Amino acid sequence: MAKWVYLFKEGNAQMRNLLGGKGANLAEMTGLGLPVPQGFTITTEACTQYYEDGQEINDEIMGQINEYIGKMEEITGKKFGDAENPLLVSVRSGARASMPGMMDTILNLGLNETVVNAIAEKSGNPRWAWDCYRRFIQMYSDVVMEVGKKYFEELIDAMKEKKGVKQDVELTAEDLKELANQFKAEYKEKIGADFPDDPKEQLMGAIKAVFRSWDNPRANVYRRDNDIPYSWGTAVNVQSMAFGNMGDDCGTGVAFTRDPATGEKGLFGEFLTNAQGEDVVAGVRTPMHISEMGEKFPEAFEEFNKVCKILEDHYRDMQDMEFTVEHGKLYMLQTRNGKRTAQAALKIACDLVDEGMRTEEEAVAMIDPRNLDTLLHPQFDAAALKAATPAGKGLGASPGAACGRIVFTAEDAEKWDERGEKVVLVRLETSPEDITGMKVAQGILTVRGGMTSHAAVVARGMGTCCVSGCGDIAMDEANKKFTLAGKEYHEGDWISIDGTTGNIYDGQIPTADAKIAGEFGRVMAWADKFRTLKVRTNADTPADAKKARELGAEGIGLCRTEHMFFEEDRIAAFREMICSDTAEEREAALEKILPYQQGDFEKLYEALEGCPVTIRFLDPPLHEFVPTEEADIEKLAEAQGKSVETIKNIIASLHEFNPMMGHRGCRLAVTYPEIAKMQTRAVIRAAINVKKAHADWNVKPEIMIPLVCEEKELKFVKKVVVETADAEIAAAGIDLKYEVGTMIEIPRAALTADAIAKDADFFCFGTNDLTQMTYGFSRDDAGKFLNAYYDKKILENDPFAKLDQTGVGKLMELAIKLGKPVNPNLHVGICGEHGGDPSSVEFCHKIGLDYVSCSPFRVPIARLAAAQAAIRSGDEK
Ligand code: PEP
Ligand code: MG
């Protein structure tokens, strides 16, 4: 019989896949002898089984859970439902990778009328007892039975009004008892049955709810963003309750061993007296700084400091811990490697190396490459910031600068974003349901909540700027307005927030790119030491190329030459070329284009200082460039000496039913070889000029032919290129080497790669098109139906963002396997969007690519991912 349930005593940190992060760490802390309220973990496999069994907990699992309740009762000396010494438990989710706030938790489970009366008497604290009960009914109704929270909140508000009090803590035991009864009546009305009294029934409901929460929409979005497979499932932890809300000698907190925003070493966290954990995390009350805990509970604080040291030394990483103090005694509820900003991740990694806790390799391996993106996010323009006066201040919860128009709901954030507006989401507090709105917002501002509130944790994970806990804001969410420093702000007003200082500014403050230095450079240098995969960039302009070089690009893997024609003065010449009737006309137009291209290529070579530059020949369907405005059509007609009608006819003739599979790519060079000739001239002349100016640089152009599907196609275009290039080189009397290669972006090219490799110096996988053509999904339209595919669990990720290793990857492997034996010098890269995605980079390393190429801002991500791939596979340099 499979084992579905483990006591904390039976597990350890290595069992993360089975017990989830939380369960494995509770087990590890138990093994270390730390004060952990005891309990058991139901495995992630049980979750998977629950889904396989049609969302039912089968008899075998149910039997083991019941058996372990018995064991837990023995360990704690308490009994479920007992009037003398009742067992009360928390039920929490815990996946293999931590997903803060994405799944459900239930506290105080095991309460019923009998038990409440018993604990009220035993503790001499009826207020606490009834507070626990009303919280439990509220949480259970919301999480397990999905009765909306708001009904209960309305009842609390009505009670407070009736009693003439402002805070929950001012309600008496009698008030809370009355509330608990009102809650039960509400439950019965909504559900049509009595609130369950039997603790075992409550527990099964709670466990199912946690399993179910694995599949809730916010968890699904979080998983997609964080590369967490659906198949992992979540474990469920059932733990004996420790009470932080039993009186003023109790409390609860969340703390980190290092500052998760800056990485600075030292205890960092928050604490609330007479409260339960959810109060801190949910941001309902604004907590005090952890240091104040030392004044209130000196002994527990001292012990907590010791525990922090033990845990950090043990895990050799910054820890994020939840704990409770019950009547002055410390209980550890959770520890995990803490989420952190990119800045903090780099600082912590460097500090751990300097402290002798980690090797350089380990330091490189512990940074999430996707996180680096946030380092490159904008900061406020320094001069403009100096001149501005803050209108208010909250907590700097997630660094960066944000400037946008105020919206009050996550839904509005999405709507405004779709219209192309930049928004700052302003909320009383955020809840996990807000995640989609938080994702699109430039920044998040909340009235309530501390550094460990949901808004802060999620924003940091996303790298979105966040200011939390600005209590000076008088919020009126219902009417979409708030007041700060005497000014009323409405939806659509501009606001700027600084996630580092917590400052809030009225109006717009311009932002500027972030500067990268210090620890970033150090970690990148380590990464470069270990990786074998080269990292190039996709750059079409000298400015992009320069930025990419600064970020460590070792070449250009893709220059999309058509992008050089977006500017006003250039597009005219390009349109003349497209709307030519004869080869002579086309050649005349191409003559006008040539100097632009040559000039751009020269600048690219200059920016790359002798590193390889791959120029891809014209690729897009031509009609994308034709004029649509009447005035532009008239201008073009005049320039070409044609009638407006003739131009309109030419434009109409360029129409295609399926342009992505139409007259594009190398098909353009096949029909109009003069285009390839002009582009070859521009490339070679530029290279000659730069080589003359920099004799020490290795200038060796790489000409890349797109969308090849047949050997003879490449042969034909290559012949045009070689004849033209050789003539240019001979005329210049210079020794210049160049390469001609092809993109592999049509399945047929991969399948016939042995033939194609005979004529190619290199292959570069255009995985955007290769994905499009392998799936038969239009890359422009797939967004319309992909959500349905995620909902129905047909796909877990967007294959245009994360490489489909099973299908598209197989074609890539095949192309390499067929191509390399034919041409042992063949070098191979990737330049589709996947070149900057960490898991795709790892795959590229595994199948033996020479380089990945990605957009400039993703170059550091790719460098780090490449190093991690090398370290993980044990073949680092
Ligand atoms: C590709 O198809 O992956 C590619 C890089 O080319 P483009 O995106 O320009 O079609
Ligand atoms: Mg392509």
Image (cartoon, grey):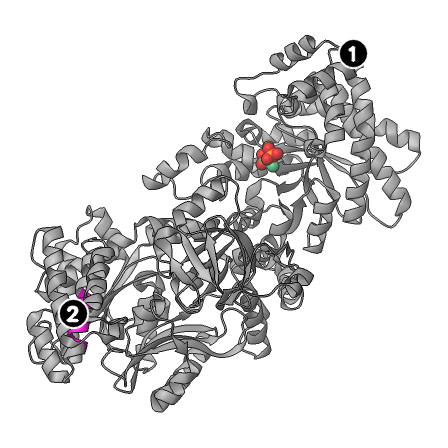
Q: Secondary structure at mark 1?
A: loop
Provide the residue designation for mark 1.
Answer: 641
**Span of residues in magenta:** 128-136
Q: Residue furthest front?
A: 486
Provide the residue designation for mark 2.
Answer: 133
Residue 702: give x, y in percent of width and height.
74, 37
> Is 552 or 49 nearer to us in this picture?
552
* Residue 132 among magenta residues: yes
At 44% from the left and 47% from the top, the residue drawn is: 413
> Is 332 or 196 nearer to us in this picture?
196
Label 2 crowd bin: few (<14), some (14–19), many (20+), radius 10 Å: many
Q: CA distance from mark 2 to mark 1?
A: 86 Å
Main SS, magenta residues? helix
- The quadrant of the rendering that contains the N terminus is bottom left
Residue 236: give x, y in percent of width and height.
26, 62
Residue 538: give x, y in percent of width and height.
65, 43
